[in-house]
Image (tube, rainbow, N blue to C red):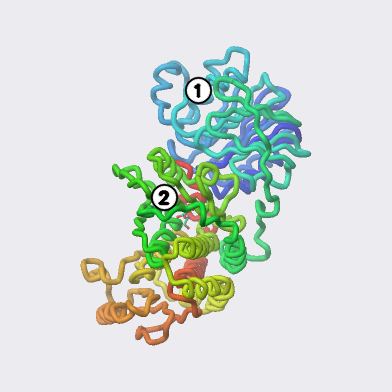
Amino acid sequence: MCGIIGVNGCMAAPVLLDGLKRLEYRGYDSAGVAVLESDGIRTVKCRGRVDALIEKLDRLPPFTGTLGIGHTRWATKGEPSDENAHPHTCGRFSVVHNGILENDGALRDKYLRLCPFSSETDSEVIAQLLNRLYNGDPLQTVAKTADLLAGSFALAVLCADAPDTLFCVRRSSPLLVGLGEDGGLAASDLSAFADRIQTLYRLADGEIAAVHRNSVDFYTFDLSPVDKQPEPFDRVQATAEKGGYEHFMLKEIHETPSAVRRTVQAAGAFDAAAFDKPSRIFITACGSAYHVGEAAKFVWEELLGVPVEVGIASEFRSRTLPLPEGSLVVTVSQSGETADTLAALRESKRQGVPVLSIVNVPHSTIAAESDHVFYTKAGVEVAVATTKAYVAQLAAVYAIGLALAERWQTAPGQRIERLKKELSRLPAAVEEALPCERRMRELAETLPAGEPVFFVGRGQGAAAAMEAALKLKEVSYLPAQSVPAGEMKHGTISLIHAGTPVFAFCLNEALNARMQSNIDELRARGAAVTAVSLTDDIRAQSLLRLPQVPELFAVSVAVIPMQLLSYYAARRLGCDIDKPRNLAKSVTVE
Ligand code: M6R
């Protein structure tokens, strides 16, 4: 993870700090900047958030240089500390790194045995190598160093002997370069500099950029020039403000209807004719995006009559999974940069299987490497806990399912037409789910601190339960567990005692009788059960009636109250809602 930024051409420090604030969602353990001043490179860094860095800088003489780099860290190798913070500066070079090196030990042994290291990071190896290999030609040295590195890396590099050039390098970690009135810029993602650039380029794997004030040269690692065209981009989509809300998470929950509306409207661009009916569909993703896959399984199996297997992307490569000929792989990712999802995508392509990806962030690596992309239109999502993007991904799943069912004639035409109409109504239904906010706030007050909360369901209800539990634990730190309702009695029910909060998702009429039995079993052991239901005939301590939608679309409305519950539980417990501890928005390490 980590966010990196570089600038060449204007007062560097304010641009770096502004960019780091916007990149902070990528990691917030420590932060730092290095600027080329008249007397050489000056580096300031510290443990903690970008605000801690700003406070530290306020006590120091101001920077005046126009060439600089910055970093906000999510610790991988080496604990969060001042020493392990980036940039790492060595001799004439300073570097910021996003990614993980796989051969840092071997490089230390081979090239850097006598070098004094001041941190525990793999990234310092890069700074030491640049210094060790320096032959008076900064570009050559950067290229030679890049070629020796194994693993994932996006780098921004300063050399004291190249005051007019910011060097950028990429393999497997995202890096964008832009040109505008403030000069040349580079960053891990567009939101860091969208309002400062007119022209945008995306570095491909194995490329170097030499970024000047008004131009940029691209090379491969063997320094062959690369002819690269700028990419179109949407400046408004790339920036986000809180707009009067206390937290991005709450603002983004309230933006869900428009995120769904835009996504449904964009579905017309999906070309179902590009897909032959596969023998099997494999969906792979991480976290909430994986939970979208769990819901998609029910929707697509019913509409398409194709067996669907859903797998966590980090486990995709842990098995020897021969993808049968005629399969389709689907990845789901808000950021489009999640390393495990990207690795699964690459493995699928290696096996010759086409990949369709549902992605929110344009210019992302997963979008660029997929055979087919369905862009959700959730807009920028800043809070680490995904909300509107998750529901937009579900809307994409419904739209894709209907388009393919129509194309492959796997569902009756009348049913497809009716569901299409319902899909166009989904933004309104999602909006109808929001007024439960006050009730969820009150319910959040009743969740006992430190006590586990359970989420159960069957079918799509089990998928909704998974997402509800993740949301609650990630933002409020309350122990939360999801269990398929029928599985409770095979072990987990031993944790139920008087007053244990349980949320039971009843999203499918055909399964409700069995859900009712499971709810009764829990109540008999003292659980305080709230039924989250499409109908009002379920008996529980309390009932949360959802807006009317077809059962196939139920998860998208069922999850909204749970997002609000999580938000208010976290608020009551004084948690850092938009940046929960130990997490980052974009997980670019495996
Ligand atoms: O960017 P992605 O959708 O690929 O991210 C996947 C997960 O890291 C993400 O959904 C994560 O689980 C969220 N923090 C959950 O709110």
Distance from label 2 to label 1 (Cα)?
32 Å
Q: In x, y percent, where is residue 63? A: 71, 34
**Residue 316 visible from this viewpoint:** yes
Q: How many other residues sit within 10 Å of disc 2, few (<14), some (14-19) or many (≥20)?
A: many
Q: Secondary structure at mark 2?
A: strand
Residue 490: name its quadrant.
Answer: bottom left
Q: How many other residues sit within 10 Å of disc 1, few (<14), some (14-19) or many (≥20)?
A: few
Q: Secondary structure at mark 1?
A: helix
Task: Pick whichever, 474 or 151, lies toward us.
Answer: 151
* Amino acid type for the residue under numbered disc 2: Val
Most extreme residue toward the left, as rendered? 490
Mark 2 or 1: the one toward you: 2
Q: Which mark is residue 147?
A: 1
Q: In x, y percent, where is residue 39? A: 70, 22
Counting the numbered discs, the total is 2
Task: Pick whichever, 197 or 495, lies toward us.
Answer: 197
Q: In x, y percent, where is residue 547? A: 50, 79
Taking 113 as reference, is 13 above or below it?
Answer: below
* Amino acid type for the residue under numbered disc 1: Asp
Q: Residue at x 45, y 35 (%)?
A: 100
Q: Is residue 40 left or right of residue 263?
A: right
Q: Residue at x 73, y 42 (%)?
A: 197
List the residue tagged with mark 2: 329
Taking 31 as reference, is 491 above or below it?
Answer: below
**Residue 574 visible from this viewpoint:** no
Sequence-first tag of 2 and 1? 1
Q: Residue at x 65, y 32 (%)?
A: 228
